[in-house]
C-alpha cells in the first residue's frame, strides 16, 4: 500500500517555516561596490543592471544606500586613474580604494572588505606581474613569488586606510601567509582575512570584467585560477589557505560550484563564503528582461541554494534588492 509515508504533511503553510532547513537574511550578504577614479559621475554598468561605478565623492553615499537596505558589509573594487605593468595604484596610499575605505570607515558603520588583487590596476589586466614575453607567448604567465610582495603591500595599505577585512583574490600561491604576516607586522593583527580559496577560471566573470575594466589584454587566467573540472583540488587549496591563516574560505563562482561549497563546509571549521558572481547575476536579469523568469524569485532561490549547500555568507549583486524584501 502506497504511500507508506507522507512528507507532504510538513508542507502546509503553518509548518513550512518551522521545518525550514536554511534561512537567508540581510546580514548574510555582502554587497560589491565599485569606486572609479576616472569619473565624477555615477556610471551605470550595462551588463549588471542596477549597478554602477561611483566616483570617490559618492562612495560614502553609495555605502549608505547599501546599509539602508539592511546589508551591513561591502566589498570594494577600484578602477584607478592610471594603470601600469606592476599595478602600482593597487598599493598606493592615495589609491582610489584606499581613499574610499578611509572615507567609508570614518563616516559609516559598514563592515568594509577590500578585494586584494592587481588585475584592475595592471595595464595587461593580469592578477600579478607577468613574465617577460607573455604578450606573445600564451604558455608564459604571472610570476608567482614576485607578485606576493605587491599583494602584501596592497593588503597593508587597505588595512592602514581602515579596512576591517582583506580578501585576496589573485590565486597566487602563498598569498594568504604572506599577507597575514605583513598585516601582523604592521600592527593589523585584528584585520580579518577572507581568502578566495577555490577560485575557478570561470567564464561567469564576464560582466565583472566590464565593470572593473580588468579583462586580460592577452592570454587568460588558466595558469593561476582553478580548472573548473577539479573538485578535490579545492580541498587542497582551502587546506593551504586555512593553514596559512585565512579566517574565512570562499568559493567562487557560487551556483555552478555548489558541490565545492558543500565539500568545504563539511571539511573545515571556518566560515564558508560563496561569491554569486557577475555572470550569475547578469543571466538572471537577461532572462527576466525577456519575461522568461521571475527575477526576485530566482534571485532568492539562488541565494537559498548557496545557504543550503553550506555558505555562511554570500557576496552578491542581489544583496540590496533581496535585503529590501527579507
Ligand atoms: C579580481 C576579481 C574578479 C572577480 C572578483 N575579483 C575578476 C577575475 O578574477 O577575473 C569577479 C567577480 C564577478 O564576476 O562578480 N581578481
Image (spheres, rainbow, N blue to C red):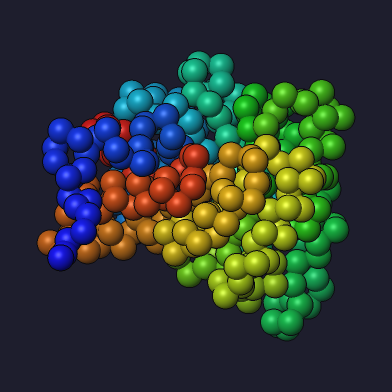
Image check: 171 left or right of 18? right
Quarter of the C terminus within the rendering: top left
For the residue pair 87 and 164, the one nearer the viewer reads as 164
Image check: 79 left or right of 29? right
Q: Is residue 29 visible?
A: yes
Q: Residue shown at 36%/32% (left/top)?
A: 25
For the residue pair 296 and 230, the one nearer the viewer reads as 230
Q: Identify the image quadrant of residue 225.
A: bottom right
In this rendering, the answer to whether 205 lies above or below 251 is: below
Q: Position of residue 114 (x, y in %)?
A: 60, 38
In this rendering, the answer to whether 306 lies above or below 143 is: above
For the residue pair 162 and 184, the one nearer the viewer reads as 184
In this rendering, the answer to whether 138 lies above or below 13 is: below
Q: Is residue 250 visible?
A: no
Q: Position of residue 200 (x, y in %)?
A: 58, 64
In this rendering, the answer to whether 118 lies above or below 324 is: below
Amino acid at each position: 500500500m502506497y504511500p507508506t509515508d507522507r512528507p507532504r504533511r510538513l508542507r502546509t503553510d503553518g509548518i513550512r517555516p518551522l521545518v525550514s532547513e536554511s534561512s537567508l537574511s540581510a546580514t548574510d550578504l555582502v554587497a560589491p561596490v565599485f569606486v572609479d577614479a576616472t569619473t565624477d559621475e555615477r556610471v551605470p554598468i550595462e551588463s549588471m543592471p542596477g549597478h554602477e561605478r561611483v566616483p570617490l565623492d559618492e562612495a560614502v553615499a553609495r555605502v549608505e544606500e547599501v546599509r539602508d537596505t539592511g546589508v551591513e558589509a561591502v566589498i570594494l573594487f577600484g578602477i584607478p586613474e592610471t594603470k601600469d605593468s606592476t599595478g602600482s595604484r593597487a598599493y598606493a596610499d592615495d589609491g582610489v580604494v584606499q581613499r574610499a575605505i578611509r572615507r567609508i570607515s570614518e563616516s559609516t558603520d559598514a563592515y568594509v572588505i577590500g578585494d586584494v588583487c592587481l588585475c584592475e590596476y595592471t595595464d595587461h589586466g593580469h592578477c600579478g606581474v607577468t613574465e617577460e614575453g607573455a604578450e606573445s607567448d600564451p604558455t608564459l604567465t604571472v610570476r608567482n613569488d614576485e607578485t606576493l610582495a605587491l599583494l602584501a603591500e596592497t593588503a597593508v595599505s587597505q588595512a592602514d586606510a581602515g579596512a576591517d577585512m582583506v580578501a585576496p583574490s589573485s590565486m597566487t600561491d602563498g598569498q594568504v601567509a604572506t599577507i597575514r604576516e605583513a598585516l601582523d607586522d604592521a600592527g593589523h593583527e585584528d584585520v580579518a582575512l577572507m581568502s578566495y580559496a577555490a577560485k575557478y577560471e570561470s567564464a561567469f566573470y564576464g560582466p565583472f570584467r566590464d565593470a572593473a575594466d580588468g579583462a586580460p589584454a592577452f592570454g587568460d587566467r588558466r595558469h593561476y585560477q582553478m580548472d573548473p573540472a577539479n573538485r578535490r583540488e579545492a580541498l587542497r587549496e582551502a587546506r593551504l589557505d586555512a593553514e596559512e591563516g585565512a579566517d574565512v574560505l570562499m568559493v567562487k563562482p557560487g551556483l555552478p560550484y555548489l558541490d565545492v561549497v558543500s565539500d568545504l563546509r563539511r571539511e573545515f571549521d571556518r566560515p564558508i563564503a560563496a561569491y554569486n558572481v557577475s555572470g550569475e547575476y547578469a543571466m538572471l536579469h537577461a532572462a527576466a528582461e525577456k519575461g522568461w523568469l521571475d527575477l526576485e524569485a530566482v534571485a532568492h532561490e539562488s541565494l537559498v541554494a548557496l545557504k543550503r549547500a553550506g555558505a555562511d555568507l554570500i557576496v552578491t549583486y542581489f544583496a540590496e534588492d533581496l535585503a529590501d524584501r527579507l
